[in-house]
Image (cartoon, helix red, strand yellow):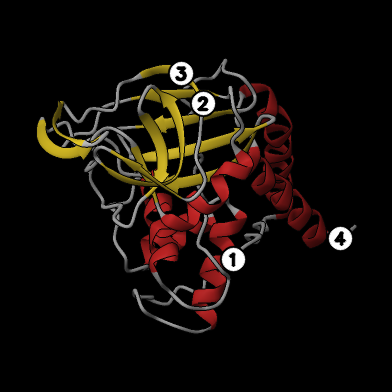
Amino acid sequence: MGVRQHLAVAAAMITAGAVLAISPPAMAAPVAVRQTVQQTVQQTGQQAAPVWVAPGKTVKFGAKGSVVKVLQARLKELGYMPGKIDGRYGGATQSAVWAFQKVNGIKPTSTVVAKTWRALENPKLPKVLAPTGKPTRAEVNLSTQILVLYVKGQIKLISHISSGSGIPYVEYATWNGTRQQFSGDARTPTGTFKTTWRRTGWHKSYLGELYNPIFFNGGIAFHGALSVPLYPASHGCVRLPMHVAEVLPGLLGTGVPVIVRGKFQR
């Protein structure tokens, strides 16, 4: 195998390890490959070409075309959910861009510029909240407003979320035939829980309607919402983009650990 081929293969292994590894043991092989690449570079003076090269063009919300398609494909490859790979930059792709930017320490914005493209070439992993947790689990990082679903030790899905606003509320609604007052602190409690019951489609609660809710802490659930802003805005549930809520029930079973950590700083 030639030097360039050797470097390309080694770089590919590094990237695969960087995207999929979630624990120190899983990182052992990529570290060895990194050392091999470093030795090869020292011996030949040649740099390994990146496995994935960003187009580098500025892309704004509403854009269409091949560059958007490249962006969508890359986000999907890394575990984010941009919706259909159709070359149309809509709401689903925007939420995936936001999630990626937050994981990589970039201030979320709908416009993809050089900083985000560079991060897409060398992406970071989401912070692991439960290093000794079950191989299949959901982690909710309230600080970054991110959901990460692990299945059999591998990242299956990374999504933008909006959790409890923390603003106390008092609302009135007709429930069980009578008008009642409901109040709370609009907080998403931290802790370790498990998924319990769920509903398919729109489920009406006394605080509104939830799409495909999966409950994990009493009345607190993952659910789709028409509004998932870049700040905590719910009564306590974990809001998801609608296209994520469409597929999550097929990936997240009953009795799966849900780890909620962190605190959002406004």
Q: Residue 222: image x %, image y %?
A: 42, 38
Q: Is residue 57 left or right of residue 184?
A: right
Callout 2: helix, strand or loop?
loop
Q: What residue did someone put label 1 on? A: 73
Q: Earlier in the sequence, mark 4 or mark 1?
A: 4
Three-letter residue code for mark 1? Ala
For label 2, the crowd category at 10 Å Cα-Cα, with few meaning under 14, some 14 to 19 and many 20 or more, is: many
Q: What residue did someone put label 3 on? A: 193
Q: Quadrant of the C terminus?
A: top left
Residue at 54% in and 19% down: 131
Q: Is residue 30 above or below residue 107?
A: above
Q: Earlier in the sequence, mark 1 or mark 3?
A: 1
Q: CA distance from mark 3 to mark 4?
A: 52 Å
- Of 21 and 152, nearer the camera is 152
Query: Do residues under tags 3 and 2 come within 8 Å of each other at their CB atoms?
Result: yes
Q: What residue did someone put label 4 on? A: 2
Instruction: Point out which mark residue 195 bears.
Output: 2
For label 3, the crowd category at 10 Å Cα-Cα, with few meaning under 14, some 14 to 19 and many 20 or more, is: some
